[in-house]
Amino acid sequence: MRFWSFWFNSFVLSSQYNPPRFVELLMLLLAIAMLAIASILPDMPYLILGLSLVVGASVSILVREAIAPSPQTRITQLTASLLLIISLYGFADLIYTL
């Protein structure tokens, strides 16, 4: 029980300390869940929703880093750009296969 209490308190503190980063974390966690479901079930809505969440989180991260740079700005921008490129490629492949 103490384990879950620790994680819950960490999430609460994280959401209070840096709300934009917390929302981006939630978006990426939901994207991972949707893409995992899309890999198990062959339904398109899960894939589209997962890719949309990745695009939204990536753009949000890039905008946040442009406005208020963090100490690890370069690696954060590189990771967000890579996620954005991969998800846009996923959309292009999805449109091509339809």
Image (cartoon, rainbow, N blue to C red):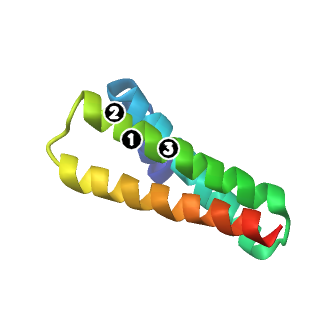
Q: Position of residue 6 (x, y in %)?
A: 41, 45
Residue furthest top in the image:
16
Residue highlighted by disc 2: 64
The answer to whether marks 1 and 3 mark residues whose Cβ atoms lie closer than 8 Å is: yes
**Quarter assignment of residue 92:** bottom right
Q: Secondary structure at mark 2?
A: helix
Residue nearest the viewer, comparing 14 with 28 = 28
Cα distance between the residues tagged 1 and 3: 6 Å
Q: Secondary structure at mark 3?
A: helix
User: In this rendering, does residue 55 appear at all?
Assistant: yes
The answer to whether marks 2 and 1 mark residues whose Cβ atoms lie closer than 8 Å is: yes
Q: Position of residue 3 (x, y in %)?
A: 45, 53
Image quadrant occupied by the C terminus: bottom right
Q: Secondary structure at mark 1?
A: helix
**Residue in the picture at 60% in, 47% down:** 53
Cα distance between the residues tagged 3 and 2: 10 Å
**Residue in the picture at 28% in, 51% down:** 76
